[in-house]
Amino acid sequence: MTLSSKLSDPRLFRQYAYVDGKWTHGEGGREEAVFDPATGEALGHIPWLEAHQITAAVDAAEAAFVHWRALRADERCERLLAWYDLLQAHREDLATLMTLEQGKPLPDARGEVEYGASFVRWFAEEGKRTFGETIPSHIPNAALGTIKEPVGIAALITPWNFPLAMITRKAAAAMAAGCTVIVKPAGETPFSALALAELAERAGIPAGVFNVVLGDPPEVSRILCAEDRVKALSFTGSTRVGRLLLEQCANTVKRVSLELGGNAPFIVGPDMDPREAAFAAVAAKFQTAGQDCLAADRILVHESIHDAFVEHFAERMAALTVGNGLESEIDLGPLIHRQAVEKAAAIVDDAISKGATLVAGDQSQAPGENFFMPVLLTGVTHDMKIWHEESFAPVAGITAYADDDQVIEMANDTEYGLAAYIYTHDIRRIWKIMRALEFGMVSVNSVKMTGPPVPFGGVKHSGLGREGGVTGIDEYLETKYYCLGALGSVSGS
Ligand code: NAD
């Protein structure tokens, strides 16, 4: 059965790049297959564009910028809201496409479509509130103030773990600000990005405003970073690649926003019900099969409830179902590819060789070669890879701690600083730990923390800038200061 036959609207499945409102072949003839990680079957192919075709996308975005920025904010809002409506109307097809190329269970994919669409609605409205300010003048007979203007063309480079929402969280902000965008999705999950392009076209977003380019990742990124006409780069992905891109943007002094890796601590206080906390930790660890920058990577449990917590965690983990995300009642789909499975196995082996205890996780039960059964390790310590590296897999590591000062030190013992979780009802403990954590986002007694109204982003090596919230649009705006002099005598100036 072909992929398009699984969709109620087959035209959402596109095997071309999308440049200047046209579906585009690669002129060099090179194509890459895209695989279903659950079955290993090829879903389709995408072209790799030649260098001059990437430059043509910049030409198109430059030409479209002239007209797009000139629209009134409410006119851009209307078009973005039409895009939002189409995302909602095609939620089921978008979710199916996502499960097929990414592997996450269908209910999670539906959730991501909702989540991704919610940023389009949020920024459609925020675009109408890009207020400047009036500055009390220190210059005689002058009026001072600021206006906000779009930065220009924005290049958006995105990962495979959230193939739709990581694009809309950037693109909707940029487009609402009046920028045009060139999206370079991950090669593993291009079809969600291309379906977004199809729906953008149907929503009346003009040619050249939303472009999707495909090709060799280092080559495409190098061209976009070196292009002086590209004024902003927004990247979500690994810290390793984020560093490379930051360097590549230095020559053209671009605006750079980076949403990079995470290594979230999940801190459980001694006052917690171990069952409640363990169930929350399972939810925070195993979403998207652990391939999540917010995954609870280091679970730090007070020694007084450690054993009970481990027992409840293991019980809850044992109930998780692993399988093809298109089937019903599946909690964990496959990992994105075989290398991810091998990396997870190596991280588990490393921890065990350094003294961690394997409580659960039998890989002989895996339903296919890209699947990894959930693993629970206890006795995890600082010298193990799992402490410092994102496992990006369903591998949970638990460590006991003695007091608040020790757990703060443990939690901050990482290059990353994206998200952290605290579970305790002791308000003094919450305040002390929350203030001491070197993370951009801290969630207390809640697994869910993200959404359009909040500033999403990290500190340390987890990134630069924030997405979402009232500040997310600022990444795509310049502040222009004006001084209107020689106005004559104005009262109060
Ligand atoms: P990745 O860095 O390998 O790839 C991200 C993007 O960069 C893809 O489009 C890829 O094609 C491209 N790329 C890869 N190598 C490149 C190179 N040498 N030069 C230029 N571009 C290159 O990351 P990934 O494996 O796709 O995603 C997982 C990572 O993303 C994890 O580290 C995760 O924590 C992070 N992530 C962060 C957030 C956040 O909001 N902070 C959200 C989701 C994922």
Image: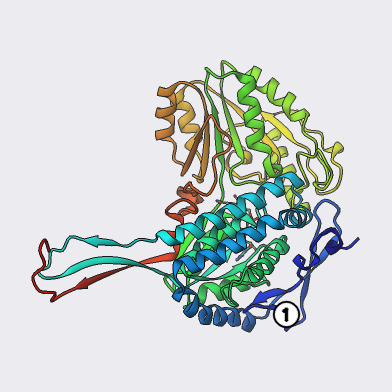
Whether residue 142 is situated above or below residue 430 in the rendered picture: below
Toward which corner of the image does residue 374 lie, by quadrant?
Answer: top right
Residue 135's x, y, as percent?
A: 21, 61
Of residue 183 and residue 256, the one placed in the foreground of this image is 183
Tell me the SS state at disc 1: loop
- For the question of whether residue 92 can be seen, the reply is yes
How many marks are shown on the rendered structure? Answer: 1
Of residue 360 and residue 186, the one placed in the foreground of this image is 186
Question: Ligand 1: which quarter?
Answer: bottom right
Residue 115's x, y, as percent?
A: 61, 50
Toward which corner of the image does residue 219 lie, by quadrant?
Answer: bottom right
Of residue 287 and residue 471, the one placed in the foreground of this image is 471
The amino acid sitting under disc 1 is Gly
Q: How dense is the environment of label 1, judged by Cα within 10 Å: few (below 14), some, or many (20 and up)? A: some
| Quadrant of the snapshot with the N terminus | bottom right
Residue at the image position 87 percent from the left and 62 percent from the top: 5
Residue behind mark 1: 26
Residue at the image position 56 percent from the left and 67 percent from the top: 79
In the image, farthest residue toward the right? 1
Residue at the image position 73 percent from the left and 34 percent from the top: 375
Residue 11's x, y, as percent?
A: 77, 68
